[in-house]
Structures are given as C-alpha cells and as structure tokens.
Image (cartoon, rainbow, N blue to C red):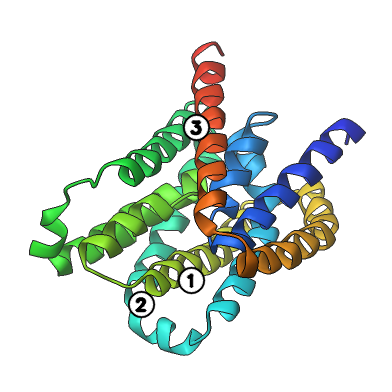
Amino acid sequence: METDFLLIFALIVFASSLIHGSIGFGFGMMATPAIAMFTDIQTAITYILVPTMLVNLVSILSEGRFFEALKKFWFIIALMVVGSCIGTVILIYFNSEYFKLLLAFIIFIYLLQSIVKIEASFISANPKASTYGLGIIGGIVSGLTNVVAPLTIIYTLELKYSKKDTIQLSNLCFLFTKIGQIAVFVYFGAFTQSAVELSALSFIVVGVGLFFGLKIKKIIDAKFYVKILKVLLFIIACVLVVDTISF
C-alpha cells in the first residue's frame, strides 16, 4: 500500500474522529466519501468498519444511559441490521461506481434538511410503518454507503425526540449495523488483509482524534464544527458526483 494513501487515510480518519468527538456524530458521513474519492466505495467502507465501531462506541458511552437507549430503540436497530446485511450483499455483488452517487445524494439530503425543515408528516402520522421503513430502507442505505444519519435525523425530529436520543439512535444503529456488515464481508471473503491492517493502524489515530474532539466539545461551540462539517461534506459530495459522472 502506497505511503501517500496511508498519510491521506490517516488524515481523513483523524479529522473525522475529531469532528465526531466534538459534535457527537459525523465520522462515517465524513470519512466514507472522503476515502471513496481515492478508491471504490466497498473498499472505503471495509477500511473504516472497525474504526467506525470504535468511534460510535465511545460516543454512545460518553452520552450515557446506554442500556436505556438500547431498550428504547432495539426494534429499529434490529431492522436496520437486517437491512444493512441486505445492502452489504448488494454492494459485494455489484460494487458499482454509481453507488458513490447514492452516497452523494444522501449527503445532499443531510445538508438540505439542515437548511430547511423537510416536511415528513407521514412519519408522525404513521409511526409504526415509518419505523419499519427507516429500519429496512435505512439499513440498506447504510450497507451501501456507510451513511444513515440524515434519515435518522429526519425521523427523530419528526417524532420530537431529544438531541441526545437522536445522537444515541444514530450511533447505536451504526455500531450494530457495522457488526452485521463485518459478518457479511467475512462470509464472502471481502474483508481483506489490507482492511485488517488499516483498521489496526487507525486505532491510535482515532483515539487521538476522539480525545481532542471530546475536549473541544466542552469548550467550543458545536455549531462552529457543524458548519465546518457541512462545508467539507458539500465539497466532497460534489467531487464524488463529478468523479462518478466522468468515470
């Protein structure tokens, strides 16, 4: 593996974990498309599977009340794991460059809903059906793109969940869907030696990024970091679109 890519990978993982630690989410949404600019989306996902689990576990524990959140959201998490496994199988069989467009689209949805409130009254009108929909569809999207936060944010906002619940749901869904993804990748022999090595190397980088991110969270206005995240995501999503269309 080339030294240049290792340095870029380390920088992306550090920046993503720093932002995640400071605002409570964003690692997968930031790291996946950034790494996908230098490789295919399946490879990008396998490279950050284990780091994503570590980041989300730390975030869940830092928010507190882990078992309470798990008890509240266990059903939707279970559905999302099933959906994620389906999405991962699709990813393995096709691994199309056009999945990058789906990733960019999900990012644009996140950016749009943060600017204007997306009307999703059908969620509050049909909470049970919406739970099934978010679980399965959100899981498939997570399996294909490693990003699901925009969908969980829209869902929790419409059902009037607190900010803590929104963060916990996003992190819990990520944690457990990544466990399912690893199982699928291992079963199909798609979890490569390179992915294992990068995962091991990234632990130190993620740890340092999270450490400083959690420190920053206590002293810096989170809105500042959210603005940085949005600008970077917009640039990355645009690059993914241009890169895929010109492929």
Closer mark to the observer between disc 1 and disc 3: 3
Residue annotated with mark 2? 73
Question: Which quadrant is the N terminus positioned in?
Answer: top right
Number of the label disc, if any, that sits on residue 234? 3
**Distance of label 3 from label 2 (alpha carbons):** 30 Å
Q: Amino acid at mark 1?
A: Leu
Which of pointers 1 and 3 lies earlier in the amino acid sequence? 1
**Distance of label 2 from label 1 (alpha carbons):** 8 Å
Q: Residue at x 26, y 42 (%)?
A: 116
Q: Determine the residue located farthest toward the right in the rendered image.
A: 3
Query: Closer to the camera, 229 or 16?
Result: 229
Q: Is residue 189 visible?
A: no
Question: Which quadrant is the C terminus positioned in?
Answer: top right
Number of the label disc, if any, that sits on residue 172? 1
Q: Determine the residue located farthest toward the top in the rendered image.
A: 246
**Left or right of 6 on screen, residue 160:** left
Dot 2, crowdedness within 10 Å: few (<14), some or many (≥20)?
A: some
Dot 3, crowdedness within 10 Å: few (<14), some or many (≥20)?
A: some
Q: Residue at x 12, y 55 (%)?
A: 121
- Residue 195 is situated, as x and y percent measured from the top left of the image, at 76, 50
Dot 1, crowdedness within 10 Å: few (<14), some or many (≥20)?
A: many
Contact? badges 2 and 1 (CB < 8 Å): yes
Closer mark to the observer between disc 3 and disc 2: 3
Q: Amino acid at mark 3?
A: Phe
Q: Residue at x 63, y 59 (%)?
A: 52
Q: Secondary structure at mark 2?
A: helix
